[in-house]
Amino acid sequence: MKKIILVILCIGLGLSAGSWFVLNLQQPPEEERFKDGQVIARHVGISVSNTAAIEELVKQLPFSEALTAVSIEGTSVKMTYEPAGKEQADWTGSNEKTIRSAGTSFLESRLSKLIMHHTLALFLSVSDLSELQIRYTDTVSDVTFETDRQRIEDYTPRDIERATSSATRFNRVVVEDYVLVESRRSVFFKKFEDALQILPSN
């Protein structure tokens, strides 16, 4: 009887380990998740007035599992992200400390990549988007990034102006050459320093 129980336990542990391994194989590395050029290219030229298409686009952007709200008012889009507590460190580098925008931990974080990626992706693909707000909240930080088309156009380097012409070009130019390069993220957030507000969470 003891041998039977032992065999059953071993089988159960084996199945659990196998399932974990398969799930991790199926989940692409974090940096690969930002390479969503096919999604962006498919939505190029859509209008904010097409709310269904905008919501579809936003929900297909990377890390949408933490997306809790999408609001479309006129030509403005607002998005809110709120990850589960155990995932906070993946987003900001800490579960306990309020984010500091000037710190390297913020520039290295998923959140900085997401803000830059989503901002460029939406302004490059949505023809009449005028204002964008990305909000992030967790147990210690409340982050709001808000900007408009004029400021984005003043920032946008020439080599990414036409980067939505194909999925491959978007992934290579916008994602690999800008979003995933820390020095480029540093330039971006210095340019938009006053657009980023970080407060302690209530």
Image (cartoon, rainbow, N blue to C red):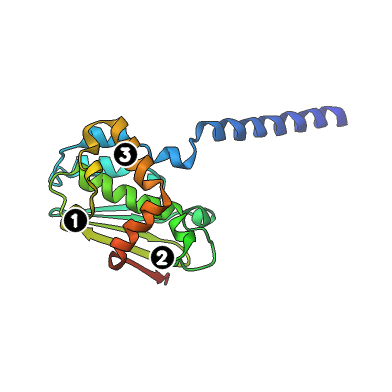
Q: CA distance from mark 3 to mark 1?
A: 18 Å
Circle nearer the N terminus (3, 1): 1
The residue labelled by disc 2 is 101
Circle nearer the N terminus (3, 2): 2
Residue 38 visible at all = no
Quarter of image, res 13: top right
The picture places residue 45, in percent across and down from the top left corner, at: 15, 38
Q: Quadrant of the C terminus?
A: bottom left
The picture places residue 44, in percent across and down from the top left corner, at: 19, 37
Q: Secondary structure at mark 3?
A: helix
Q: Secondary structure at mark 1?
A: helix
Q: Residue at x 26, y 41 (%)?
A: 57
Check whether the beta carbons of the residues at disc 3 and disc 2 lie within 8 A of each other. Answer: no
Mark 3 or mark 2, which is nearer to you? 3
The picture places residue 192, in percent across and down from the top left corner, at: 29, 62
Which amino acid, by three-letter code, is at mark 1? Answer: Asp
Circle nearer the N terminus (1, 2): 2
The residue labelled by disc 3 is 173
Q: CA distance from mark 1 to mark 2?
A: 22 Å
For residue 194, side relative to residue 138 (left or right): left
Residue 14 visible at all = yes
The residue labelled by disc 1 is 154
Residue count near mark 1 (Cα–Cα under 10 Å), binned few <14, some 14–19, many ≥20:
few
Asked if residue 18 is positioned above or below residue 57 in the image, the reply reads above
Which amino acid, by three-letter code, is at mark 3? Answer: Val
